[in-house]
Amino acid sequence: MSEHKAIIRWSQAGGPFARGRFSREHTWSFDGGLTVPASSAPAVVPPPLSNPANIDPEEAFVASLSSCHMLTFLYLAYREGLEVASYEDEAVGVVSKNERGVAWVSQVVLNPRVVYEGSKTPTPADEERLHHAAHEGCFISSSVKTDVQVRLLPPAP
């Protein structure tokens, strides 16, 4: 199998830490060399203690589910001889409270819009089957208890 690593860095940048008045801005660094500015979600910790321009863990979670689904879908489409011209997903994650009152990402809805080219195009039933197989084969969706739904969107005009 494989390992996947991330380095998360935060340091005190002013503000009274003991009273919770500290910045939540930090960075995520990945083995390929990319460093991404991150922060808590502004809905959780309001600015200026968070930075809405940075990626927050909740939206990264949604993006990882969407990305994994897309990559699995593209592979399955390729295996079936389909030519995908473009793929776009406006994924939405919902945070709610569980039975203990703890916030969690309870649902992620994927809204993929796939455009095909070439002579072979899938029927709606074929596309639904491919998305179902992509969901079942996605490493990330197989690793979480969040309800992940796929709602197919027609290609944009």
Image (cartoon, rainbow, N blue to C red):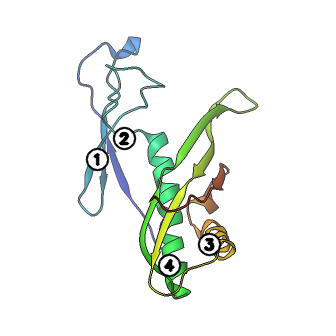
Q: Quarter of the image holding residue 52?
A: top left
Residue shown at 43%/22% (left/top)? 45
Element carrying mark 3? helix
Gap between marks 3 and 2, in whole Å? 31 Å
Q: Which residue is mark 4?
A: 75
Mark whose residue sits in front, 4 or 2: 4
Mark whose residue sits in front, 4 or 3: 3
Residue type, mark 4 in image: Tyr
Q: Which residue is mark 1?
A: 36
Gap between marks 1 and 2, in whole Å? 8 Å
Element carrying mark 1? strand
Q: Which residue is mark 3?
A: 127
Measured as percent of width and height from the top left, residue 87 is found at 44, 65
Q: Quarter of the image holding residue 101?
A: top right
Q: Are marks 1 and 2 in contact (CB under 8 Å)?
A: yes
Measured as percent of width and height from the top left, residue 60 is found at 44, 47
Residue type, mark 2 in image: Ile
Indicate which disc, 4 or 2, sits on the residue closer to the N terminus: 2
Gap between marks 3 and 1, in whole Å? 34 Å
Gap between marks 1 and 4, in whole Å? 27 Å
Number of labels in the image equals 4
Indicate which disc, 3 or 1, sits on the residue closer to the N terminus: 1
Q: Are marks 4 and 3 in contact (CB under 8 Å)?
A: no
Mark whose residue sits in front, 3 or 1: 3
Q: Which residue is mark 2?
A: 55
Mark whose residue sits in front, 1 or 4: 4
Q: Residue furthest front?
A: 157
Measured as percent of width and height from the top left, residue 5 is found at 39, 59
Q: Residue furthest right?
A: 99
How packed is label 2: few (under 14 Cα within 10 Å), some, or many (20 or more)? Answer: some
Residue shown at 36%/54% (left/top)? 6
